Every structure is written in C-alpha cells, then in structure tokens.
Image (tube, rainbow, N blue to C red):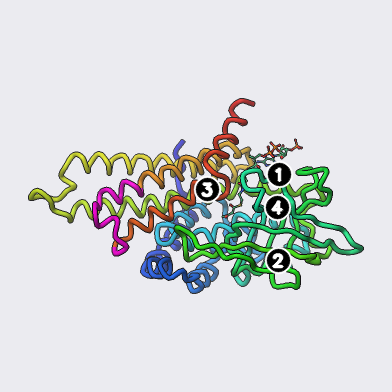
Amino acid sequence: MPFPLLEEHRMTQQTARDVAQKEIAPHASEWSHSGTFPKSAIQKLAKLGLMGVCVPEEYGGSGLDHFSYILALEEIAVACASTAVIMSVNNSLVCEPLKLFGSETQKKTFLTPLAQGKKLGCFCLSEPNAGSDAGNQQTVAVKKGDRYLLSGTKNFITNGPQADFAIVFAVTDKTQKKKSVSAFIVDKHQKGVEVGKVEKKMGIQASGCCQLIFNETEVPIQNLLGSEGEGYKIALRTLDGGRIGIGAQAVGIARAAFEAASSYAKERHQFGKPIAEFQAIQWILADMATQIEAARLLVHQAAYLNDQGRPFTKEAAMAKLFASETAMKVTTDAVQVYGGYGYSKEYPVERFFRDAKITEIYEGTSEIQRLVIAAQVLK
Ligand code: CAA
C-alpha cells in the first residue's frame, strides 16, 4: 500500500531534514565519540515542535499526526541516532501515554512542558529481572494516605540521567503480578530518586542511559496515570507506538549507511575504476536500497494505521523487527563496502554499525517482536 505524503507531511519532513543536516549531522560523530549529550540539538528540536509532534497545540505540542512524527524521526536519525532516540523516548514513550491516559491536570502540569521541550521525559519499565519479561515487575508502590511510596530499581533508562519527569511502573500487590502494575508520573529531581549506574554503551553514546533507584519515593495519588492496575496495558500500548518510532530510527540509520556507502563506491578506485562499477558492489547497494524501502513501507503502514485509529500492534512489531534487522544488515554491508576504512573511526560507517545494533534490542528485542507477531497471526 503506497502512502502519499500530504503537504503537512512534506513540510515536517523538510523542516526535520534541514535541522538534521545543518545543525545535527556536523556534530554527531564528535558527540558520539565523546559521549556528549546533544543539548543544543534537543533545544533546536524543541523550537521546531519536534519534542511533542503528536501532542495537541493546547498542550504545547505541534498537533500533527503519527505519520509526520515518523517522517521527522527518520530525518533526525539519518543525522544522529542518539538525538533520534532522545526525541523518540520523549515523544512516543512519555508524551503519548500522557496524552492518551493523562488527566487534565496531568496534561497541564507534565505533558505541556514535555511537549514544548522545556522538560525531558523517560520511561521506567525495565528492571534487573524484568527485561523481555516486563510483567515481572518488582518495583512496589505502597499507598499511604494521599500518596504512594515507590521502591525499586529500574534498568537501562534512556534519557534517565537528563530527564526531569519519569513514567514509572510498579506493582501495588506483588501477588497479583502484572494485573497490579500501575503507572506513576514522578518528578525525577525529587527526594528518593537516585541516578544509579550510568551505562557505557556500544553505540548511541550521546544519549544518556542509566539505572534509576527509587527509595520510598513519595508520589501524590493524583500522579497515578490511568487507573490502579492499568499500568501493564498502558506500558504495552505505549510500546506499540514506540516500536514504530524505533523502526523509523532504524530506517534513518540504514539510510545514512547506504548514502555513505554508495557515494564512497563512486569515489573509491580499485583495479583502475570506481568500485561502484563492479557488480559485486552493485548487488550489495541494490539489496541495501531495496531493504530500506521495504522497511520504510512497513513503518509507514504502522503509523498510518495508528493515525486511522485501527489496530496496529502486529504492524508495529513487524516494522520494528524488519527495520532493525535491515539497519544491522545494511550497516554491516556498508562497513564491507568501505573495506579497511569502514573499520576506522575516521569514517562514519562504523558508528552507524554500532548504533544500528540497539534497534534490535530496545523497546522489545527481535525475539519479542516475533512473539508479538506470532500471537497476532495465530489469533
Ligand atoms: N496493548 C494493550 N494491551 C495489551 C497489549 C497491547 N499491545 N498486548 C497485550 N495486552 C494486554 C493483554 O490483553 C492482557 O490483558 P488481560 O490480562 O486483560 O487479558 C495483558 O495486556 C497481558 O498480556 P499478555 O499476558 O499477553 O502479556 P505478557 O506478559 O505475556 O507479555 C510481551 C507480552 C510481549 C512479552 C511483553 O511483556 C513485552 O512486550 N515485553 C518486552 C518489553 C519491552 O519491550 N521492553 C522495552 C522497555 S522500554 C525501552 O526499551 C525504552 C528505551 O530504552 C528506548
């Protein structure tokens, strides 16, 4: 199914492409190698309304659809995968559940500054023993008068070191397991929240990732997102949308690798001619281009269904699975096209290769995406 772009889609795509190529791409390698959080890039995205793309304007967002969002995200990911994941967590994993499940007060207090990019959000689901098995939450929320006390450890929290607000999942009754998971909005700067180990990662080093430790953190009852016991469904619904974003990020990384490899192939001479004139290289480039287009179509399909209000769990998982595996394949082949230079940090493809790997892992590993798809097709 082709997805013709409307005028607003083209404008958002072009705006994102301009900022990505002019303001982000020139610094991406340096940010990544030095592990510098791209604060200036996030501020620029905020000014353009890209930190709350699908949030209604009355809550500080751009009021655009999910299709616009993934078009913009692909452009940012072409320039810098780290900046893309920071943007995607804020949009997909924090603004989106606040928009869908938040009360009016929660939208005014938390969603608005997050969508404006004045504050940054993170999503605290994973734990030391609740990764793929996200239902095995050990973080507890104990109700005490007009507040809950949250205690537990959250792992691999993207944006964790820099975030202002966190959506934290915790159980109110351990015996009820996933049925008693609830979602809470927590001010990360408050007493009882500690930044634990900061991860040293293989790729996307410009984005922050850490453990967050909650130690009897006081959360007012009005910060319960949705109702008590609804948290696991909120998490899975949120991840459905998030997975489309990671699919778009993966397409962006793959596109960056393809663009680099194809121009290198035209410049690099061996055996008296550009290596692009050898069929061995042409076939690699042809496969790359084909896989990227297929991945993009799956991402577009999932975003389109989401915008139509139709079920999209299966399509989001397919988009994420196919796009992330495409990113890994395309970036691996891009290193091969560059030969020895591809293995050097002087050229960008080794960064694309390292950045691509995480798209097969976070927001549900490829194995989990296959489980989700299988459950849907066997229904
Ligand atoms: N939307 C809403 N509700 C859903 C749902 C969805 N997509 N999928 C299932 N549910 C509902 C079910 O209907 C069920 O409800 P009932 O109890 O009323 O029947 C309930 O949720 C539980 O469903 P399951 O028993 O099928 O779920 P499960 O516990 O077997 O788990 C899973 C399924 C697919 C393995 C899930 O745990 C999963 O997706 N795991 C991966 C976790 C993940 O992606 N983590 C990413 C962390 S965030 C991150 O990575 C951010 C970052 O760094 C960038």
Is residue 30 magenta-colored?
Answer: no
Q: Earlier in the sequence, mark 1 or mark 4?
A: 4
Where is residue 29 drawn, in percent x and y? 38, 66
Q: Quadrant of the C terminus?
A: top right
Q: Report whether the residue tagged 1 is closer than 8 Å to ligand 1.
A: yes
- Whether pointer 1 and pointer 4 mark residues with C-beta atoms closer than 8 Å, the reply is no
Q: Residues within 10 Å of mark 4 (few under 14, many from 20)?
A: some
Q: Earlier in the sequence, mark 4 or mark 2?
A: 4
- Secondary structure of the residue carrying numbered label 3: loop
Q: Earlier in the sequence, mark 4 or mark 3?
A: 4
What type is the residue that disc 4 sits on?
Leu
Residue 36 in the figure: left or right of residue 139: left
Q: Earlier in the sequence, mark 3 or mark 1?
A: 1
Residue 256 in the figure: left or right of residue 231: left
Between the C-alphas of marks 1 and 4, the distance is 21 Å
Q: Residue furthest right?
A: 145
Question: Which residue, given by chain and number where applicable, does mark 1 sit on?
Answer: 135
Question: Which residue, given by chain and number where applicable, does mark 4 sit on?
Answer: 100
Q: Please tell me in which quadrant of the rendered image residue 347 appears.
A: bottom left
Q: Residues within 10 Å of mark 1 (few under 14, many from 20)?
A: many
Q: Residue furthest top?
A: 378
Where is residue 254 drawn, in percent x and y? 38, 50
The quarter of the image that holds ligand 1 is: top right
- Secondary structure of the residue carrying numbered label 2: helix
Question: Which residue, given by chain and number where applicable, does mark 3 sit on?
Answer: 361
What type is the residue that disc 3 sits on?
Ile
Give the extent of the magenta segment.
331-346
Q: Looking at the rendered structure, which numbered label has been put on residue 110? A: 2
What type is the residue that disc 2 sits on?
Phe
Vertical side of 15 occupied by 178: above or below: above
Is residue 335 magenta-colored?
Answer: yes
Vertical side of 54 occupied by 29: above or below: below
